[in-house]
């Protein structure tokens, strides 16, 4: 076969084989890449990688369980919608100034990320700042960050950008 025919034919076959295995699907709020039926959130992965290299988490701290802010936030979450909320287990908690993000798992409720605010030594849940549910096939952190930023625009971007889920429910 001549080179003039072989090269274009090879290119056509390569594109056809790739197209038969890879596609793009619009779903919910963004796009997913589908590889042999498996949905992949490429945009979410890219956002996570970008934030890993550009975020500044110097003012954000991950709270240990014994810290006062952690205890107050845990108590607020457990009291929010009893009796199911009383089984709350905090997987991780981040804080910046008066703002706190808590990643929580429950016995009978879906996992959640809860936004809390402390004013006048009282920690309260910001009702419109609760993400609850599963995130698959989406990358959890970018999806939850986007949702919380829309719901609670006054939350510090630095705190949201440093949020990285730790629980099994989101990974």
Image: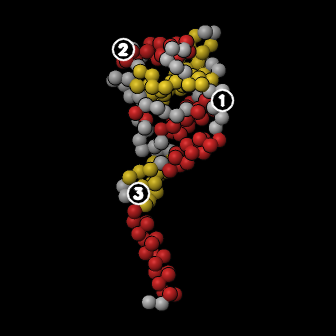
- Tell me if residue 71 comes above or below residue 30 in the rendering: above
Task: Give residue 25's position: percent from left, percent from top.
Answer: 45, 54
Q: Which of 3 and 134 is in front in this view?
A: 3
* Residue neighbourhood size for the residue with mark 3, other residues' Cα within 10 Å, grouped as few (<14), some (14–19), many (≥20): some
Give the tally of numbered discs.
3
Name the residue: 44% across, 59% down: 23
Q: Is mark 2 on a helix, strand or loop?
A: loop
Question: Which of the colour schemes (rainbow, by chain, secondary structure, one colour) is used?
Answer: secondary structure
Q: Distance between the residues labelled 2 and 3?
A: 43 Å
Tag 2 residue: 83
Where is residue 100? Give x, y as percent.
57, 22
* Residue farthest toward the bottom in the current orientation of the protein: 2
Q: Relative to 61, is 44 above or below? A: below
Q: How far apart are marks 2 and 1 (CA)?
A: 37 Å
Q: Of helix, strand and loop, which one carries label 1?
A: loop
Counting residues from the start of the chain, the first of labels 2 and 3 encountered is: 3
Earlier in the chain: of badge 2 and badge 1, it is 1
**Which residue is the site of mark 1?**
58
Q: Is residue 126 visible to us here?
A: no
In the picture provided, is 51 more to the left or to the right than 35? right
**Callout in the foreground (2, 3):** 3
Q: Are marks 2 and 1 in contact (CB under 8 Å)?
A: no
How far apart are labels 3 and 1 at the CA level? 38 Å
Q: Residue at x 41, y 69 (%)?
A: 17
Q: Position of residue 110 (x, y in %)?
A: 38, 28
- Compared to residue 3, the image places residue 26 above or below, namely above
**Can residue 160 be seen in this snapshot?**
yes
Which quadrant, please, contains the C terminus? Answer: top left
Instruction: Return the mark for residue 136.
Output: none
Task: Say which of marks 3 and 1 sits in front.
Answer: 1
What residue sits right under mark 3 in the picture?
35
């Amino acid at each position: 076969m001549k080179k003039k025919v072989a090269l274009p034919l090879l290119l056509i076959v390569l594109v056809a084989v790739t197209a038969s295995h890879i596609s793009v699907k619009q779903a919910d709020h963004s796009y997913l890449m589908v590889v042999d039926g498996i949905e992949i959130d490429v945009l979410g992965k890219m956002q996570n990688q970008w934030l890993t290299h550009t975020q500044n988490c110097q003012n954000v701290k991950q709270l240990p369980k014994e810290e006062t802010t952690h205890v107050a936030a845990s108590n607020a979450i457990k009291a929010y919608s009893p009796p199911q909320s009383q089984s709350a287990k905090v997987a991780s908690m981040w804080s910046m100034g008066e703002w706190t993000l808590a990643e929580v798992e429950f016995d009978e409720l879906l996992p959640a990320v809860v936004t809390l605010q402390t004013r006048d030594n009282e920690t309260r849940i910001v009702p419109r700042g609760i993400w609850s549910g599963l995130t698959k096939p989406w990358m959890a952190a970018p999806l939850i960050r986007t949702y919380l930023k829309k719901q609670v625009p006054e939350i510090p971007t630095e705190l949201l950008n440093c949020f990285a889920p730790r629980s099994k429910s989101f990974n």
